[in-house]
Amino acid sequence: MSHIAMLANPTGRRDSHHHSGLEPILENNLCSLLASPNGPEKSEEMIRRILRADQGDHVIIGGPNPPLYRNQNALREFVVAREQLLEQMGDVRDGDSVFVFGISLGEQVAHVLRTRPNARITVWDRDPYLVRLALTRQDYGSSLRSGRLTIAMGADLIDYLPRLERCRVVLHPAFRRIYADEMRLVSESVAGISPSEGRKWIGLGMGGVVVTDIAESLRSEGYSVFPLEIRRWEPEETRYAIQKLHMERVITVNFDQEVALACQDEGVPLVIWDVDPKTDRTPISSPSAKNVRVLTLREANVETLKESGFTDVGHLPVGVDVEKRRPMQLEPAEIERYAAPVSFVGSSLIHRARRFKRLFLQLYASFDCAGTVTFEETEERLESLLAAERVDYSTYVTDELVEESFGEFLRAAQRCGTPDDPQKWVAEIVASHKRIAYVSALADENIHVWGDSEWKRIATKNRGMRYMGAASFGHEMTLVYNGAGINVDVNRIYQPDVVPLRVFDVLACGGFLIAEHSDALDQLFSVGEELESYRSLEELEQKVAHYRAHPDEARAIAERGLRAVRERHTMRQRVKQLLAPL
């Protein structure tokens, strides 16, 4: 078995069609990499990292569409068109040292190699799968063997930052935005700012909508941020980054077992901010875990997390970046697009609800091995439960109903170690039903709805509701919140003790908000003074009608809400708590 075959198949199993099991172009490139001037030890390490990247569910290639890359639930085209190639290479001279930011499908690297025969090239990408994909499609063999082409991934970027002032940097048109945190490091280095020496590195686990805001606040506190793509990297890649950067601490949005183990092994403090709604079970801490803190949006989760073995647990509500979310004077064209008497921004949750219903029924059927209950009977029982909750969405009884109807199944699923909790699947179904019912009830108030395309179908059945499309989470969301006379929040029904990010975002934009009432909302804001709230659908309808007729009252409340967020609820204030000594 060849050296590459051994690296590709460490167990020694052979592929029946090819001795290494690799595509021929990929194998040739890896053999060339092994023969590069970097030396066998460094090359072998890189080859192992590339070969571990064998899952590419976030990349869609084939069919009628161009190649697509999934990022933050959005699909983006990432092929570099010929005119973009020519534009990107316009100031690259033959003989330059070139740094290509983002490998994509390898077309930019191939173009430089072909048109600048004396240039030396380093190509970097965050995503090991894209590196593997490019090496499968492009023959770089001779350039890798000669050392003219060098490949870097993930935390390797740090090695090249001091040299970028002397390089021609070629940016990938799509990935320069997707890899915004690394792009920030590259831009600073090209400008001669923030040298690598003396940096205080924090690893930030990617995931969730608040990550960008956390990163910006960490920089304001004097830290350098390096993203850990924990959902797409293999655990070894995360460990590699932690080791290479000698991180002062790692902060993750939500818990990840592999990251926790890596931090424990490396002796790096870990802070977990439990932010996003989840259907998986409460994680269990290792008895030997040290220097781990868990902060959760849900105050009720504090005791649950302590019972599961975490000793340093606290409650931390979400905050808002008041530089990003701020009051704005809309231009005439923006008024045309974003002005609305009433506005709701958020997912219909329909796709999740359908998926979780299917999973619930399938899992239940798998536990009923004797087939004593038909699929249809189980679905009918579940539908009866959902109908009982629809009688009054202001009182959440789904958990009790699921326990009453399916308690034996829930306990069997837990004993078998299913990572998700079926009870939470049903809760998410109910959350979708309630959200649709409440938003639809405001159709007569000419509500504008921003979110997934399912809202378009719902709008066709509710005269007066206007579907506006999906608002991007960045600047466009700020325009939406500024343009609405009344912003409405419909929280997930199963988490009344959480004040969602939408509340802070709207108030930071100087928007007037009617939010679902909860004790948590009362603790953070002066309800009736800084924002309004409702306890039932009838009260929501009444208050929307009242404040449409009394806009001056709404504006006065919105002004006090803006002051409250700026004084008490900024992301920078929250980050100070994430940085507190463990």
Image: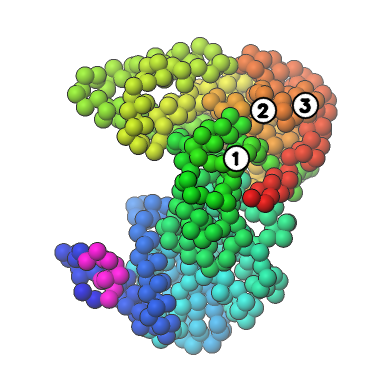
Side of 281 where 343 appears, left or right: right
* Residue 364 percent coordinates (x, y): 30, 27
Residue 242 or residue 58, whichever sits in front = 242
Label 2: few (<14), some or many (≥20) within 10 Å? some
* Residue 71 percent coordinates (x, y): 50, 51
Q: Which residue does the image show at 46% across and 13% down from the upper left?
A: 388
Q: Against 162, is 441 above or below? A: above
Q: Which callout, 3 or 1, points to the residue nearer the camera?
A: 1
Compute the Cα span from label 3 to label 1: 27 Å
Is residue 70 something that shows in the picture?
no
Q: Against 216, is 308 above or below? A: above
> Magenta stretch?
3-12
Q: Which residue does the image show at 66% across and 64% down from the upper left?
A: 200
* Residue 535 percent coordinates (x, y): 65, 17
**Which residue is denoted by mark 3 in the rendering?**
526
Label 1: few (<14), some or many (≥20) within 10 Å? some
**Which residue is denoted by mark 2 in the rendering?**
520
Q: Determine the secondary structure under disc 3.
A: loop
Mark earlier in primary sequence (3, 1): 1
Residue 6 magenta = yes
